[in-house]
Image: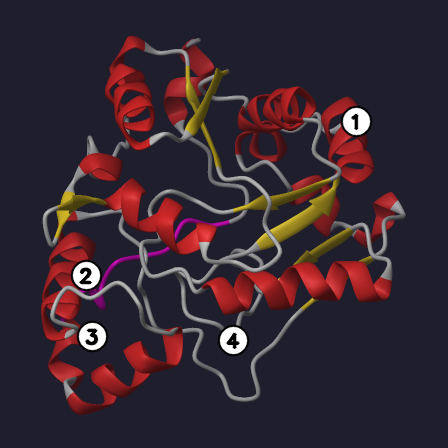
Amino acid sequence: MGSSRLPGKVLKEICGKPMIGWVAERAARSKLIDQVLIATTKSPDDDPIQWFCEKSNLTCFRGNEFDVLDRYYQAAKKAEAEIIVRLTADCPLIDPTLIDETIEALLNGQMDFTANRLPPPYHRTYPIGQDVEVATFVALESAWKKAEALYEREHVMPYLYDPKNGLKSVILDYKIDLGTYRWTVDTPEDLEFIRQLTSLLKCKDEFTWLDVVKILDKNPELVRINADITHKKLKEVDGRANSK
């Protein structure tokens, strides 16, 4: 709820449903995910997220506000998870098929970490907002024990990106480069884009990410709504963390 660019964003409504509800429901359509868990903070500002989870029969874990790696680790430990899929609550168009493809890449390749994108300055081929990261509990625990940089703690998995840390990882790429599309919600412009897009989808929540591409091909003016928004970079951290 404490987003610096769009306060309260995860409960902003899209077609009458809170954004975090879109994420949770679409994640639950994954064929390989056993449980969807909302990992929010202990801040009183996030009490409404817990209330939403209780009303929606979703498991809610509350942990550290800025050390998100610790929050993820503690949540995974409590859930006794062997494999952790990281999704962010500001990606309401997340595609369950892409979730499964990223999990399968980890399982089939016996990897420690797989993802379908890394943040700037890395290049990506999937749209921003289709972000999936998957790690074994062993790998996550290693990051939790060894990661020291502020950005590694805030952004959960950067420690796993670095090949110097000796972990087996793979990044999935799409056959063509669609990495400039921006479907995440971090600003008012992003929210307006998503609301107009879902209106064209007639507020139906069963669609694929490629259905969205087709709509944008037919309605290119939508892309201009949030085209000027800069995506956060790998080592960019919330300045509020330093005051805690």
The secondary structure that most of the magenta stretch takes on is: loop
Which residue is label 1 attached to?
146
Residue at screen point 70% across, 58% down: 114
How far apart marks 3 and 1 lie (CA) works out to: 40 Å
Q: Earlier in the sequence, mark 1 or mark 2?
A: 1
Q: Amino acid at mark 1?
A: Lys
Q: Which residue is mark 2?
A: 194
* Residues under numbered marks 2 and 4 in contact, where contact means CB atoms less than 8 Å apart: no
Name the residue tied to disc 3.
223
Query: Residue 86: percent from the left, percent from the top?
Result: 56, 45
Helix, strand, or loop for circle 3?
helix
Residue depicted at 46% across the width and 33% down the height: 237
**Magenta extent:** 225-233
Q: Quadrant of residue 122?
A: bottom right
- Distance Cα–Cα, label 2 vs label 4: 20 Å
What crowding class fits label 4: few (fewer than 14 Cα within 10 Å), some (14-19), or many (20 or more)? Answer: some
Instruction: Nearest to the eye among marks 2 and 3: give it.
Output: 2
Q: Compare residues 26 and 187 and report the one nearer the observer.
A: 26
**Residue at x 30% of width, y 41% of height:** 20
